[in-house]
Amino acid sequence: MIPAVPAGTRLLGITGAPGAGKSTLAASLGLPVVPMDGFHYADVELVRRGLRDHKGAPETFDAEGYAALLRRVRAREPDVVAPMFERGLEQPLAGAIPVPATGRIVTEGNYLLLDEPRWRVVRAEIDVVWHLVLDEEVRVERLVARHVSFGKTPDAAREWVERVDGANARLVEAARDRADLVVDLNGWAP
């Protein structure tokens, strides 16, 4: 069962390993969603930094920009527009998601609880963070299927999931004890 968003929460964070169901759960809550994935560096910047083969790792995101946008959301600034990640293009798109100045907002992403300076500033802007868990085999198969649906061959998808997503999942799971609540999604269907 999915818990209720606590009273008084402006920003609810949802985190978990890649493929755990963050985006699906966030969408099911019926609240505006600001995804961390909109803060991916564009491929051109990843190439410049020598990080293209690690896309999705913590250092491939603009954590400081993400924290700044969440700070504006928390302050209830009008006319905040968040970026999104377009999976078909595999690129972030600026100015794509209008964020209301009132009401609750959900933000979701892998690294909300990472204990590194640039990610701690993100966590400081979020009221409550839920960490999602899901059976490892189910999570991995979902990830492989997602990569295949966006153009990778099954072998390339599996290699990426093992090499990149697997390393990222271990980082995310290592930060699990910093969550306000752990939510088990095994058996949950949106």
Image (cartoon, grey):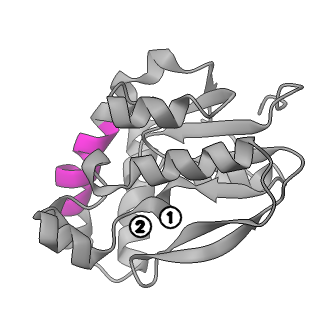
| Helix, strand or loop: magenta stretch | helix
Any part of residue 45 in sight: yes
| Residue 136 position by quadrant | top left
153, 65: nearer the viewer: 65
Q: Tell me if I can see residue 133 in this picture.
A: no
Apparent side of residue 139 relative to residue 153 in the rendered image (left or right): right
- Residue 162's spot in the image, x, y percent? 21, 51
Is label 2 in a helix, a strand or a loop? helix
Observer-side mark, 1 or 2, equals 1
**Residue at (47% x, 54% y) in the render:** 65
Span shown in magenta: 159-169
Q: Which residue is mark 1?
A: 38
Is-magenta flag for residue 26? no
x, y percent for residue 54 = 19, 58
Left/right of residue 184 with respect to residue 112 in the rendered view: right
Q: Residue at x 56, y 69 (%)?
A: 84
What residue type is disc 1 on? Gly
Q: Is residue 180 left or right of residue 58?
A: right
Q: CA distance from mark 1 to mark 2?
A: 21 Å
Q: Quadrant of the N terminus?
A: top right
Q: Is residue 137 above or below residue 153?
A: above
What label does residue 145 carry, if any? 2
Name the amino acid type tagged 2. Ala
Q: Which picture quadrant has residue 91?
A: bottom left
x 14%, y 71%: residue: 48
Residue ID at (54%, 75%): 94
Whether 161 is among the magenta residues is yes
Secondary structure of residue under mark 1:
helix
Crowding at dot 2, Cα within 10 Å, few <14 / some 14-19 / many 20+, comes out as: some
Sequence-first disc among 1 and 2? 1
